[in-house]
Structure formats: C-alpha cells, structure tokens
C-alpha cells in the first residue's frame, strides 16, 4: 500500500469511528425513595422465593436497585429452598 492509500484508509476509519456528532443525550436519572410499602413488598416476595427480576418488575425498579436494598435490609433473594 502506498502512503496515499494509507491516508485514505485512516481518514475513513477516523470518520467512521469518531464520536463527533454521534453523541447521544444521557438519560436523566430519576431516583425514587423506597416507601414502607415497597420494603414490605420486597420482603414478602423474597420470603416467597420470587427471584430478583420478578420482584424488581413488581416494584418498578431495576434488579440492581432491588438487590442493593435487599442487602441493606438483610433480606436474602436466594430462590433456593
């Protein structure tokens, strides 16, 4: 490959993979406080061995947020008998 071809290839790669103009707006994080009812639902469903994903959907929260709150409250989310 000659130097002109290399410049063309590098220009194409730079244009294709540069972040200029392709930046997306970040999603705004909205935090909701945990109500007593949310914690009660978490504990009840965990006791019934429902699993993190089902509990998170019921609470309209992420599985990560659900797991963190369960750990804070000392609630096991294990689905084992």
Image: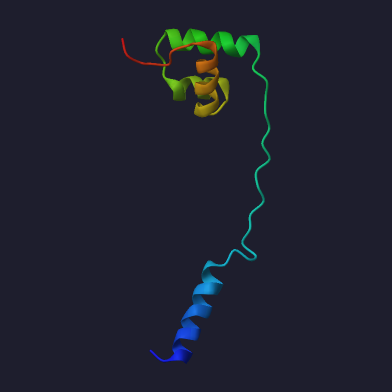
Query: Is residue 60 or residue 23 the one in the foreground?
Result: 23
Q: How many marks?
A: 0
Image point (53%, 20%), residue name: 58
The image position of residue 72, as x and y in percent, is: 54, 15
* Residue at position x 49%, y 11% in the image: 74
Q: Position of residue 28 (x, y in %)?
A: 68, 40
Image point (38%, 89%), residue name: 1
13, above or below 80, in the image:
below
> Which quadrant, please, contains the C terminus?
top left
The percent coordinates of residue 80 (x first, y second) are 32, 14
Q: Which residue is found at the position 54% from the left and 11% from the top?
A: 73
Rendered position, 28 above or below 51: below
Q: Residue furthest left?
A: 81
Indicate whether 24 appears above or below 58: below
Outermost front residue: 3
Quadrant of the rendered structure where residue 46 is?
top left
Where residue 30 sits in the image (x, y, percent)? 68, 32
Q: Please say which color scheme the image uses.
A: rainbow
């Amino acid at each position: 490959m000659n130097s002109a071809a290399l410049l063309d290839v590098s220009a194409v790669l730079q244009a294709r993979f540069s972040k200029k103009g392709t930046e997306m707006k970040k999603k705004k994080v909205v935090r909701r406080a945990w109500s007593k009812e949310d914690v009660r639902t978490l504990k009840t469903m965990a006791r019934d061995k429902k699993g993190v994903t089902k509990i998170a959907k019921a609470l309209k929260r992420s599985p990560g947020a659900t797991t963190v709150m369960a750990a804070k409250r000392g609630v096991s989310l294990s689905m084992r008998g």
